[in-house]
Image (tube, rainbow, N blue to C red):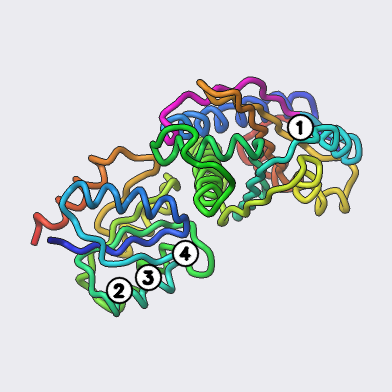
Amino acid sequence: MVISPERLRMLEIIMKLSIDNASRALSKTLRTGAKIGLSKIYMADFNATTEKMNNDTREMTGIIVNFKGNLGCKMLFMLPLEGSIILTDYYLRQPVGTTKEFNDDTESVAQELGNILASHISNTLVSDFNAKLLPEPPQVHNDFAGIIFSSLVLEQGILCDQLLLIESIFEICKTEISCYLFLLPELASLEKLLDAIGVQK
Amino acid sequence: MKRILIVDDAKVVRLVIKQILARNGFQVAGEATNGREALEKYKELKPDAVTMDIVMPEVDGIQGLKDILAYDKNAKVIMISAIDQRDALQESLLSGASDFVVKPFEDDRMVSALNSIFSKE
């Protein structure tokens, strides 16, 4: 499936609005800034993108959220394992360094941050673009970046070689934490959504 | 002291809500992690009010709200969710939710929602 440049441009604007909204919610939750360092939308080759992620050899915490509604979509929020430990202290309003290792609280904070991001992304798409979209409960995985990324794209990768990928990088202020946010919309339902709001093919 | 049942699948959210309740003169009646457990705990603990998340595994919060109100039509349930969508808000309020608080929230917002429902007694 090919998406026209005009449609890609429109999608980029729509997705930036929803990711901006999510980053504001993340900042409020953590009571520190979450700055978007990069945001882009592109048709990605399944194998090339997986290989790129395999080159990031850090151990990561990945939060995968599936959405239900008239726009099929998946979200992956991924940050370094040490970062998820620091964000646990931010979330619980305790001095950084209190949490020493990944534990039940860290997993629960990761789950809740995924829920906040996914909900606020869907809130914007629903209110501004007539989508019907609700997140399902987040799943938390600890593994290498490439393996977590593969588990996100595997299902779509089996169906087609090309993926529409929305990639953002968040930087958490006052920390060295840089996080990936991927959105992987299902192309057929995305086309219908664009048709419904009158975006030219 | 009013007793509150906290329903959320995330342990840290329950912890944060517990801390807010303790600081503001409420007692925690118990905790549940989905809508099904919420009904069981409601029957067992008979709390004065419930805080209910929406997105949860097995039985979601809107179904949990409906089940609790089917058991006790006078139950006081405050929805607390990051879902800020007209459909979810309408369904919650039409099903009988007492209030709807959007996450992330300031402590005062949740406390004022609780005080407001008890002031109507």
Question: In the displayed structure, would residue A88 be above or below residue A105?
Answer: above
Separation of disc 2 and disc 3 at Cα? 6 Å
The residue identified by callout 3 is: B38
The x, y position of residue B34, in whole percent, is: 45, 66
Q: Are marks 1 and 3 in contact (CB under 8 Å)?
A: no
Sequence-earlier tag: 2 or 4: 2
- Is A103 contained in the magenta span? no
Q: Is the same chain shared between marks 2 and 4?
A: yes
What label does residue B60 carry, if any? 4
What label does residue A201 carry, if any? 1
Dot 1: what SS? loop
Separation of disc 1 and disc 3 at Cα? 48 Å
Q: Is the same chain shared between marks 4 and 3?
A: yes
The residue identified by callout 2 is: B42
Question: In the displayed structure, would residue B6 be above or below residue A171?
Answer: below
Q: Is the same chain shared between marks 2 and 3?
A: yes
Sequence-earlier tag: 4 or 3: 3
Separation of disc 1 and disc 2 at Cα? 53 Å
> Image point 15% across, 61% down: which residue?
B2
Residue kind at label 2, given as amino acid type: Tyr
